[in-house]
């Protein structure tokens, strides 16, 4: 289930989304004439859950939610309620592939590594019970040398996840194009 697509740099909600009760409830509760709140809530769900969103790189969910809310222009009093949470959970359950889950887990671990390495002064001052350094300059330097490979692997994984999404979308929509003579050849 892919609920969103990007067309001409605009987020579009697929029509079939509204046939799913969790998302239809979001639409129905929006009393604005142009359904602008429900569209912003759907944009929130996209940016909060979808691996194609730049916001997914923020692994702290509270920070991610606050940033998205502000950036897409949801009202200040707006909060993630049970309806939005359920829709996010449903989207992640139905639309997120194993590859995407692994990619998101990799992002989280890379973020944790970055936090760990950004605290170098503490790492170098940390001592064990015998007063010996827990971390040495060599261990930190060795970890830093692994970063380019980590970045390369994350970028490659992202490309594979996007390719997988596109392949799945094409299969579901019957977008396969036949090569010459694949659909049969008749001579009149």
Image (cartoon, rainbow, N blue to C red):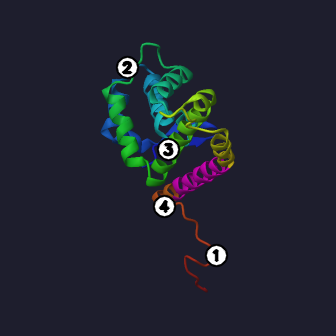
* Residue to which mark 3 is pinned: 104
* Residue to which mark 4 is pinned: 171
**Numbered circle sitting on residue 180:** 1
Nearest to N terminus: mark 2 or mark 1: 2
Mark 2 or mark 4: which is in front?
A: 4
Residue 41 place in picture, x, y as percent: 44, 28
Query: Magenta span covers which residues?
Result: 149-167
**Numbered circle sitting on residue 31:** 2
Q: How far apart are marks 4 and 1 (CA)?
A: 19 Å
Nearest to N terminus: mark 3 or mark 4: 3
Q: Distance between the residues labelled 2 and 4?
A: 36 Å
In the visual, does 43 lie left or right of 142? left
60 within the magenta span:
no
User: Which residue is pictured at 35% across the width and 31% down the height?
Assistant: 85
Q: How far apart are marks 3 and 4 (CA)?
A: 24 Å
Nearest to N terminus: mark 3 or mark 2: 2
In the visual, does 172 lie left or right of 86? right
Q: Distance between the residues labelled 3 and 1?
A: 40 Å
Secondary structure under the numbered disc 2 in the rendered image: loop
Given contact means CB atoms under 8 Å apart, are the residues at marks 2 and 4 in contact?
A: no
Nearest to N terminus: mark 4 or mark 1: 4
User: Which residue is pictured at 69% across the width and 47% down the height?
Assistant: 145
Given contact means CB atoms under 8 Å apart, are the residues at marks 3 and 1 in contact?
A: no
Instruction: Judge whether 99 appears above or below 116 on screen.
Output: below
> Could you classify mark 2 by the number of other residues whose Cα lies within 10 Å: few (under 14), some (14-19), or many (20 or more)?
few
User: Which residue is pictured at 45% across the width and 30% down the height?
Assistant: 61
Q: How far apart are marks 3 and 2 (CA)?
A: 35 Å
Secondary structure under the numbered disc 3 in the rendered image: helix
> Could you classify mark 1 by the number of other residues whose Cα lies within 10 Å: few (under 14), some (14-19), or many (20 or more)?
few
Magenta span main SS: helix
In the visual, does 135 lie left or right of 148? left
């Amino acid at each position: 289930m892919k609920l969103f697509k990007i067309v001409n740099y605009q987020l579009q909600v697929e029509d079939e989304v509204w046939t799913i009760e969790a998302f239809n409830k979001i639409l129905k509760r929006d009393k604005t004439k142009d359904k602008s709140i429900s569209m912003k809530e759907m944009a929130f769900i996209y940016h909060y859950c979808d691996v194609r969103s730049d916001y997914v790189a923020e692994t702290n969910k509270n920070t991610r939610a606050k940033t998205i809310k502000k950036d897409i222009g949801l009202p200040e009093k707006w909060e993630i309620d049970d309806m939005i949470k359920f829709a996010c959970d449903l989207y992640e359950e139905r639309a997120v592939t194993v590859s995407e889950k692994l990619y998101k887990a990799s992002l989280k671990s890379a973020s944790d590594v970055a936090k760990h390495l950004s605290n170098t002064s503490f790492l170098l001052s940390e001592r064990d019970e015998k007063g010996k350094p827990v971390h040495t300059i060599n261990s930190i330097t060795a970890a830093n040398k692994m970063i380019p490979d980590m970045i390369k692997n994350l970028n490659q994984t992202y490309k594979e996840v996007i390719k997988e999404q596109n392949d799945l979308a094409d299969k579901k929509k019957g977008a396969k194009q036949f090569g010459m003579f694949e659909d049969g050849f008749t001579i009149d």
